[in-house]
Structures are given as structure tokens and as C-alpha cells.
Image (cartoon, grey):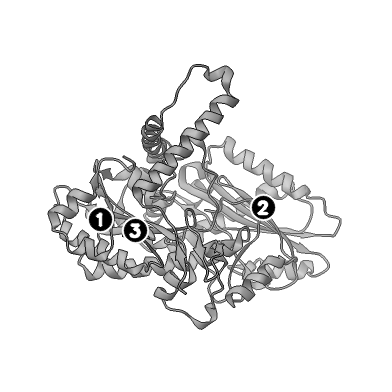
Amino acid sequence: MSQKSYLSTKSKVQLIIILFVVIGTFFYLGSNRPNSAGTVIAASDLIDHADEQAKANVENVVATMKAEFDKEYSDPSLYFEDFSEEIAVLDVACNKSLEAYFSDKIEIPYFTKSYNQYYLPTLKKFRDGEISVSEVADDPAEYIRVLKFDIYTMVSENYNGETGNQLLDYVSYLEENGVKHFMYQEIQLKTSEITEIELSKLRHFDNPFEKIKDKNVIKRRNFMSDLGSNSTRWDKEDERVKQLEKKYNVALVKADLDYSLKERSCTYYAPENDPTMKFPATEIESRCIQIYAQRALYEEIEKIVDEEGYGGKIVHIAIPRNRDVVIYDENGRGRDPDVFDFDLSLNPDNMSIINEGYKGCYDITLNLLLEEGEEIDYEKLQKITARITDLLKMNYVEGDEPWERERLFVFFYVLPEAEQKIVIDLFQRDMITETYFRERTTLSNIYSDMYYVREETEGFHYLDTRAKKKDFLLWVTGDYKSIINATVESFFEKAKQNKLIE
């Protein structure tokens, strides 16, 4: 017997959510009676509020990030320039400044490695001789977009973390001097496993961590940035990881961390043969297969976009989600979509991963990039969205209403062609986003969280701050046949709406 899954269609979902909100509002008001006596909140008001909240989220990005993005991308031609030589020189200078700061503050053996993200205009000015090495090192707030470094320390068994206090003091020092974005990792090496001579040799490698991360030298890795923090006991394994390796028949290793980390208090893992596929070890089953599914669907959507003639004009994201889905086995027992085994060692193709590996649903967003005055080709969008819908095979049909595994939206942005190329690259760079956990949905944002149509990535922030968004969107519903057989006019009329939730 085939598996089946119950998932409400648009109208049913909204009705259920409305009932949930009304009930939740009743209890919420009851628990806050002194502040809300006599107040009645209608579900329609919450829908409107959610739309306002979604807009407010973007406005907040613009208010806090526009100046930074305009500075970084003031000359779009710099984005694809090779500044590797300039970065190497500046990193050495900044590292000397960093070690000079810690020289009289840290008493145990240590060394640091800087690998900053410099503003693109900084690199251009340095290449052209307009600014010096010392100017950059002495004024990080002006010239460095994200100040990043690793610090390697030798610690004994009775080490009490005093270096951590010095690092926190350094963060305060940065903030006092106007540095907004930073990231550091303290990599604690065991004195029982490494000598000071060996530590001194490590500092000469471009990436010392690669030389020691698979050995029993590291005791703990502490991570902190302006976005989040994390601490991992490196020499201890998580039992759930062994279960996961068996479930998906894949070898896993502890993963490197980067600036975008948001999750606290867990260890990150990645397949041994692909360190880019990192995920946190909390609710580990769903996250592991979700990142495979997200990459697979990205690649298939990219192929469709290219074949239908909109390549280089559409940036997209597909976000796997489990909500509203229960898969039933042949005995009628309901299970979450992430509990099914799947053998990754067989190198399954994208379609197998999308439909058999991950059985949940996807929120898919296409962003069409237009130049000023450029017409929208709705015929191309019709074919693209129909083919994307056809990628996702359904397991169950309830009456005459098919279970649709995707929520598919199209947004429209206007910006110059040179900047479109940057956005395309940024979205490709961040195609995998399921590496952290979203905050729990609250009463105030339940409608805006009904569908995931964006992520807080550099690409979306670029569109927020430097592109002009059109005041309508498309919500494409139906299966392949109903979409592809519609006239272009009826396709557009059915899909067009002025806000996400109506």
C-alpha cells in the first residue's frame, strides 16, 4: 500500500490557522486581562498585522544595514575582482596588531590567525595606494566589514577559562571603537597532546585547524560573534550522531563554523566527503536530510530556470519544512516525514533525495530580477512554475484535491544588470540555509510565519537595501497540468495578489 499524507489546501489551512489564532487569542487575553480588558482582536486584524510585521522586518533591515551595504557594494564591478593578494597582506598586519593587544593579557602559550572580511572599497583603495596597511589595521571600524580571527591556546586539565575573559574584554574594546561585526574561535589544545614547539610550528600554516581537527589534540572549541555563540567539547562524541550515521549510512565529522552561525549549545556535523553540508546536532534527523533536499531542489530549479530562458534573472530558495505533514505507513500509523531511513551511500540522484529521502514539504520562492522598464515574461514564469510543481511527487489525493508538497511564490525586484549578477552569486553561495533552528512561532507573527518566503542571508539583504520591490507577487497553486494548460492571462490573474496572506 502506498504511503499517504494529509495536508490542507490553501483555504483549509487558513481556516484552521484562523481558528487557532482565535482560540489562542482568547487564552492570551485571559492571561493578560489587566492590560487588555475590553479588547477584542479579530483574526482578520491579525492577518493585517502579520502583513505589516513582514514589511516591518524588511524596513528594519533597511534601517540597520543599508549604509553598510551601500558602502560594500558602492562599486558593483569590485565584487568579482580578485583581491587575494591584498587580503593576505592586510591579514598579516591585522594579526600583528591583534597579538600585540593580547601580548600582556594572556599568560598561557597561544597564537592568533586573522582572516577578516574587508570592505571591497578598502581593498581597492589599498591596491591603488590610497590607504596604507597601518591605516587599515588601526581603524577596523572604517575598513573591515567583519573582524574575524582564531586563537589557539594550550590548556591544562585544570584550566579555568581565564582566556575567555580576555576575549570578552576584547569584544568590548571592539564595540567601544565602533566595530559592529566580529567573529572569533578559541581552539583549546591539550598540553598533554602538544608541545610549545609544535604549537609554534602550527602558526605558520594558512589553516592550522585543518592540521589538527581530526586528532585528539583539541579539548574544546569556543565560538562567538555578534550573531551568536557556541561551545563544543571536541573530544567527545554525540551518541545520536552514531544513530544518524546508521540511519542514512553516511560517515559524519564535526563541522567547521562560520560567521552566519546562529544556534547555541550544540555540535555541528557534516558528511565526511562534503564539509559544506553542515547541520546542528539538535533534532538532527530532520536537519541532515533537509540540507540534502534543499541543495537537490536548488539544482533542479536552477536547471529548469536555465532551460526556460530565465537563467541569470531568477534567484530562488527552497526551504524544507515538516509542519502540517504526517506520513502514514501501510498499517495506518502516522509518523513525521523525517523518520524514514534513506541510504546516502548509494549517491542518490536529486529526484530521489527530493521525493524519497525527504518526504516533507517545501516553501519555494522565486525572485525575478528586472531592469528598469523591463517587461515580465509571464509565459516563461508559467512554464517554470509548472515544471517546478512537477518535480514534487504527491503520495496521496484526498477527494479531488491533491496534496501539494510545495508553496510556490514569485516576487519581483528592479535593479541594474551589474547588480543582478551579484545577487545571483550571493543566492548560489547561500543555497543551503537549514543549518540553524527558527524561533518558535508566537501569536504576533503566526501569520507571517505561515509560509517561509525568505531567509536572512546576504542575498535577501542586498535586495532589501539596494533593489526596488514591485508591489505585487504571484502565489502559484495547482498541479503541473492545471498550470501549464491555463492561458497566460488566466495564470497571471489566478496567481496575482498584493500581499502574502489575503
Q: Are marks 2 and 3 in contact (CB under 8 Å)?
A: no
Seen at 52% across and 34% down, the residue is 24
Give the camera-side residue of 167 and 304: 304
Q: Quadrant of residue 311?
A: bottom left
Q: Is residue 209 left or right of residue 49?
A: right
Mark 2: which secondary structure?
A: loop
Q: Amino acid at mark 3?
A: His
Q: Residue 110's x, y, as percent?
A: 73, 58
Q: In the shown orientation, is residue 410 left or right of residue 344? A: left
Q: Secondary structure at mark 3?
A: strand
Q: Tag on residue 265?
A: 2
Q: Position of residue 460 (x, y in %)?
A: 38, 49
Disc 2 to disc 3, C-alpha distance = 30 Å
* Contact flag, marks 3 and 1 (Cβ < 8 Å): no
Residue 103 at x, y = what percent?
71, 50
Q: Earlier in the sequence, mark 2 or mark 1?
A: 2
Percent across and percent down for residue 61 are 41, 40
Q: Residues within 10 Å of mark 2 (few under 14, many from 20)?
A: few
Amino acid marked by disc 1? Ala
Q: Which residue is mark 3?
A: 316
Label 1, on which residue?
A: 418
Q: Which marked residue is nearer to the observer: mark 2 or mark 1?
A: 2
State the residue lying farthest toward the bottom. 346
Q: Is residue 385 visible?
A: yes
Q: The disc labelled 2 sits on which kind of residue?
A: Ser
Q: Nearer the viewer, residue 418 or 379?
A: 379
Query: Toward the viewer: 423 or 3?
Result: 3
Going from the N terminus, do you reach mark 2 or mark 3 first?
2
Distance (Cα) linking label 2 and label 1: 41 Å
Q: Crowdedness of circle 3 by 10 Å Cα count: few (<14), some, many (20+)?
A: many
- Residue 371 vs 24, above or below: the answer is below
**Up-down relation of residue 272 to residue 264 (above or below):** below
